[in-house]
Image (cartoon, grey):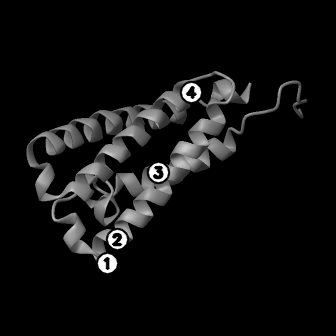
Amino acid sequence: MRQQERQTGLGRIIIAVYGIFALAATARAGYQIATEFSEAPVAYLLSALAAVVYIVATVALASRRPGSWRLSLAAVAFEFVGVVVVGILSFAVPHLFAHPAVWSHFGSGYGYVPLVLPLVGLWWLVRHRERAPGARTTP
């Protein structure tokens, strides 16, 4: 029953935070693309990508469907890699990030939650690994 445990306790908080970030990143990227796209297209497209990743992670983390654990793991791992790569690039090539993106400067505009959240999410997912159908549980 580890999969069901994934959506309880701390898991619910993780899902809620991902949901909040999905809404925040979607709203921010939508507004920036609609009003200021020409000023920083790379940053705003990366914010839109972050929004999609947060949406996928939220839905997958909340789901009990087969394969949702793997999709959650992939989305959260992609997020972590994205935050690290974009964080490094935002310092190394600052002209591409004339305006901040969700993941720029390692998520500093969001209190570094975009950097910490995938680490917590990966830890949680590993602790609540999906078992293969028919696998025995040890007492």
Residue 46 in the image, given as x and y percentages of width and height: 32, 52
Tell us which disc is closer to us: 4 or 1: 1
Disc 1 is placed on an element classified as helix
Q: Quadrant of the C terminus?
A: top right
Q: Amino acid at mark 4?
A: Thr
Q: Are marks 2 and 4 in contact (CB under 8 Å)?
A: no
Q: Amino acid at mark 1?
A: Ala
Q: Quadrant of the N terminus?
A: top right
Residue beneath disc 1? 92
> Which comes before the other along the chain, label 2 or label 4?
4
Whether residue 47 is situated above or below residue 7 in the rendered picture = below
Residue beneath disc 4? 8
Residue 49 in the image, given as x and y percentages of width and height: 36, 46
Q: Residues within 10 Å of mark 3 (few under 14, many from 20)?
A: many
Residue 48 sits in quarter? top left
Inspect this view and state whether residue 9 appears: no
Q: CA distance from mark 2 to mark 4?
A: 36 Å
Q: Are marks 2 and 1 in contact (CB under 8 Å)?
A: yes
Q: CA distance from mark 3 to mark 1?
A: 20 Å
Say which residue appears at 35% left-offset and 63% top-offset.
106
Q: CA distance from mark 4 to mark 1?
A: 40 Å
